[in-house]
Amino acid sequence: MAFLMLVSLTILMGSCQYGNTTDWKLVWSDEFNYEGLPDPSKWNYDTVGNAYGWGNRELQFYTTARDSNAFVDGKYLHIRALNELFKGFNYTSARLTTKEKGDWLYGRMEVRAKVPGGRGIWPAIWMLPTDWEYGRWPHSGEIDIMEHVGYDPDSIFATVHTGAFNHGINTQVGVGTYIPDCEDEFYVYAIEWEEDRIDFYIDDSLVFTFNNSDKGPDEWPFDKRFHLILNVAVGGNWGGVHGVDDSIFPASMVVDYVRVYTRNVK
């Protein structure tokens, strides 16, 4: 999850459910039709960056197996940020990953979710490389399927980061989509990742395409396996640009399902 400056803006009004998956075969999913902590056979808790602000000067402490920060209620997964003193931090939250439990090279990844709002909150649905074969960030790539910053309540962002295209050198490539009810309604945030491109969707609408330039991994490191990450950050270089409103907590990203497909072989 990296800081993104708006590159372009599209407009999407209303909500509809994505229904055409005939070209795809479901290979991994979590429907959240159970209760308790997230399924440990599918999800990890990522906490290794707590001491460093995750490279983005974030303010939360990501916890492990703590049902006040991540829980399933029989229908939805809730990833919840809280304003509380915990291990020297003023906020807690959760960062879930599928690393080594769900890692893919190409496919359709989709998450139906409703994002939290409020100044200082920064939820994300994204992917990182599992093996970092081209080197440290950003050289092995990053795929941000969905990011939202609470001080910009009517916009959803999608972007990619590579060695050549990243916010560190102000060359990141992405799109902002106008969705005025994104904090109140569920949307399907998805990518279709192929050898030659990554298409980004919100429900049925294609909002952004990143094409393989065939110029090597500096521009296209997306020929290695990646895993999914779901998290809700507090503050940070982007989410905290205008500070944090402590009245917004608890702030939860609510996830209906996560599904991963591969292409049907015809």
Image (cartoon, rainbow, N blue to C red):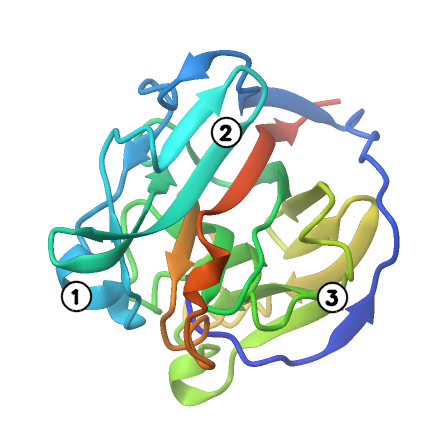
Residue 59, picture quadrant = bottom left
Element assignment for label 3: strand
- Mark 1 lies on residue: 52
N-terminal of the pair, mark 3 or mark 2, is 2
Residue at screen point 71% across, 54% down: 182
Relative depth, front residue between 79 and 111: 79
- Mark 3 lies on residue: 177
Give the residue type at disc 3.
Answer: Thr
Give the residue type at disc 1.
Answer: Tyr
- Mark 2 lies on residue: 77
Residues at discs 3 and 2 in contact (Cβ within 8 Å) = no
Residue at screen point 39% across, 57% down: 233
Q: For marks 3 and 1, give the CA distance.
A: 31 Å
| Residue 132 % position (x, y) | 28, 54
Q: Is residue 185 left or right of residue 217?
A: right
Give the residue type at disc 2.
Answer: Leu
Residues at discs 3 and 1 in contact (Cβ within 8 Å) = no
